[in-house]
Image: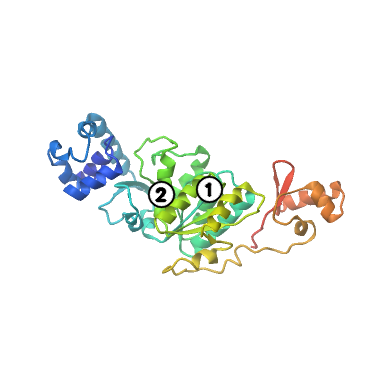
Amino acid sequence: MHDPGLASWLQLALTPGLGPATLLSMLRQFGLPRQILARKRSELTALAGPEALAALDSDEVAQAVSRALAWAGAPGHCVVTLADEAYPRMLLEISDPPALLYARGRVELLARPALAVVGSRNATPQGESNAQALAKALSEAGLTIVSGLALGIDTAAHRGGLAGPGSTIAVLGTGIDLVYPQRNAQLAAEIAERGLLLSEFPLGTAPAGQNFPRRNRLISGLARGCLVVEAALASGSLITARAAADQGREVFAMPGSIHSPLAKGCHALIKSGAKLVESADDVLAELSGFRASGYASTTKEMPAGQDCGLLALMGHDPVDVDSLCSRAGMSAEQVSSELLRLELDGRVTALPGGLYQRLEKERR
């Protein structure tokens, strides 16, 4: 038997033309969805247009409700409404909370303290390494890591979150029955098993540009703060950071090389008042009321390591072979041989344009 209360929520939420703002206005004026639907349609005209009211009782909406109810009946699936105890309290603080959320996985994560970790899709290997190590340390401290399942920093953040007890929530810009990008299909399956997939969009909603800024406000809204790791000045990650600031959340940013375009967005945030982050300790110190559990200082999580030889001469910015030859007083053959050894050891990565950059290697 389908829950008639949930069917009423879905009928309103899936009606074209009844946006979140209109639906919230109806809820405030008339009460729960069953009470709204019991009203004469003429009583709703002050809040909804004639096309939306005509669609409200259409076969198309009825079929969409049936599909959503069938999806919600599968193991590990549920639809969380504003009236549910499981609805995240943090989202009630934002100006436009969604009326309902499609959830797959561990719904209990919605009640846990969380941190959003976002950044560039075209991240550097060092940026991905930093994001994963930080997310892991914060997850071990008891924070759930929230991100958007994109490639790059989001992917690294989710993997770090899964590595600790805090786990991770992926907020999607599509329907929850779709995976975007497809390259993250395996990661999405892991999150559904050990974390939580979440979407406000109806089943079958394909990726579209306008959906992702809406998705971003939920990423920040679910969390106590938002950490940006690598972002260009024109970046969706900065939209998330601005949403976080507007929602009264803490904003954090990790600095990078002054020569990297992917550091400029983070540097702009820091100039605007974001907290500079070098370790998980910097985040935890700013989250008032949160007490870390089972957590060891991140000086053990992200050590600088012992620099020697060519690695010490590389610094932290991308560098070419000729510059390293000049610094080290070595031939190009010697430098190339040493770079290969360091790359195989996971201490250096090759970048486009003949450049190399050091990677910080975690101490086991």
- Which class describes the residues within 10 Å of circle 2: few (<14), some (14-19), or many (20+)? many
Question: Which disc number belongs to residue 74?
Answer: none
Amino acid type at image mark 1 = Thr
Looking at the image, which is closer to me, 285 or 343? 285
> Could you tell me which quadrant the C terminus lies in?
bottom right
Residue placed under numbered mark 1 in the picture: 155
Work out which quarter of the rendered image holds the N terminus and state it: top left
Give coordinates of residue 74: x percent, y percent. Answer: 33, 43
- Tell me the element at label 1: helix
Spatial CA distance of label 2 from label 1 is 18 Å
Q: Is residue 7 above or below residue 51?
A: below
Q: Quadrant of residue 113?
A: bottom left
Query: Going by the image, does 172 lie left or right of 33?
Result: right
Pick the residue in front: 134 or 140: 134
Provide residue 220's location: percent of width, then percent of height. Answer: 43, 53
The answer to whether residue 250 is left or right of residue 4 is right
Q: Which residue is mark 2?
A: 217
Q: Which kind of residue does numbered mark 2 sit on?
A: Arg
Q: Is residue 43 left or right of residue 275?
A: left
Who comes first in sequence, dot 2 or dot 1? 1
Residue 221 visible, this angle = yes
Report whether 352 appears left or right of 40: right
Q: How many marks?
A: 2
Q: Nearer the viewer, mark 2 or mark 1?
A: 2
Please provide percent x and percent y for residue 97: 32, 50
Position of residue 351 relative to residue 56, above or below, is: below
Secondary element at tag 2: helix
Viewer-closest of 104 and 329: 329
